[in-house]
Image (cartoon, helix red, strand yellow):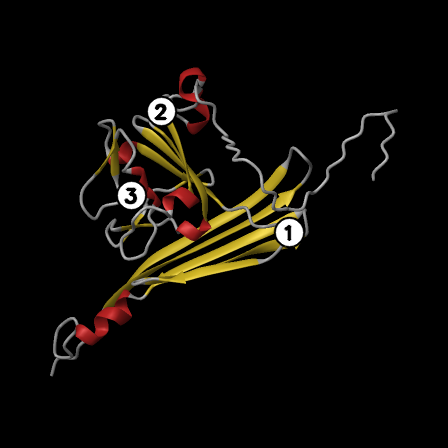
Amino acid sequence: MISINLDKNTQLNIELLPKNVTSKEIVIKDVRKDENVKSTEMGMHQLSMEAVKKLPVIMGEVDVLKSLQLLPGVSSAGEGQSGFYVRGGGPDQNLILLDEAVVYNTGHLFGFFSVFNGDAIKNVTLIKGTAPANYGGRLSSVVDVSMKEGNNKKYQVEGGIGLIASRLSIQGPILKNKASFMVSARRTYIDALVKPFVNKESTLSGSGYYFYDLNAKVNYILSKKDRLYASGYFGKDVYFQKQRKNI
């Protein structure tokens, strides 16, 4: 039991422990039924990574940009490309942000895969029209991608091994309930998979290709209304070819 004196303004935060209770079904929704009618934000779609990961994927790789192409008013720029058209606008007219930083090249392997690692992404927001002024204005659309902030209570490790790539993510507290971090890496092994099928006498012998991504983010809680974030991304496509000597 906690005693509270009501002689001054008091704010008390109580952390609840989960408990299974058998009762009638209760449905809780975070969006009102008439949200699309009364909301002033038109043409906005928000996707969580839990929903994106339920969609069919190519070779086990979750692709955020290809998931957006399933929404109404959005169409692909072509097979095997990460670009997309929104209501007739060109792919170069879309503003794509990663934690408020502009991403100019969103594809690996000539656009076949996007640069966004699904294990590092928290949610994605697509604005198809009437973009807010803080985005600077765009002719077509805005795609705002947010990375995970890190768990500030306990350490978590997750990863996966796919047909062409492997992933590993680590997140946890730096100061419990105060600061947290998140690090996520992905690398393909296309070069290792193709190597056994290449003839040693072929001109392609000794050559290969792979790409990798690295996401990192630090989150520090300054107060109940203020937070400090530091995030970064590094990715690279690597193609190598063995020099052949002429005799």
Task: Give the mark nearest the N terminus, 1 or 2.
Answer: 2
Residue 161's x, y, as percent? 37, 64
Instruction: Name which residue type carries label 2.
Output: Gly
**Label number found at residue 153:** 1
Element on which disc 1 rests: loop
Lateral position of residue 87 relative to residue 25, left or right: left
Identify the secondary structure beneath mark 2: loop
Residue at (35, 44) in percent of width and height: 64
- Label 3, secondary structure: give it: helix
Quadrant, the N terminus: top right
Tell me residue 124's x, y (percent).
41, 38
Disc 1 marks which amino acid? Answer: Lys
Q: Position of residue 169 (x, y in %)?
A: 48, 58
Quote the CA–CA distance across marks 3 and 2. 18 Å
Q: Amino acid at mark 3?
A: Lys
Going by the image, does 81 lie left or right of 14? Answer: left
The residue to which callout 2 is attached is: 43
Judge by depth and name the residue closer to the eye, 182 or 57: 57
Spatial CA span between label 1 and label 2: 36 Å
For residue 66, which numbered disc appears in the image? 3
* Residue in the foreground of this view, choosing between 100 and 244: 100
**Quarter in which the C terminus is drawn:** bottom left
Crowd rating for badge 2 (residues with CA inside 10 Å; few <14, some 14–19, many 20+):
some
Of residue 151 and residue 38, the one placed in the foreground of this image is 38
**Residue at position x 46%, y 26% from top?**
134
Q: Position of residue 218 (x, y in %)?
A: 57, 49
Q: Is residue 58 above or below residue 95?
A: below
Check contact, mark 1 vs mark 2: CB within 8 A.
no
Q: Quadrant of residue 8?
A: top right
* Residue 149 shows in the view: yes
- N-term mark: 1 or 3: 3
The quadrant in which residue 104 appears is top left
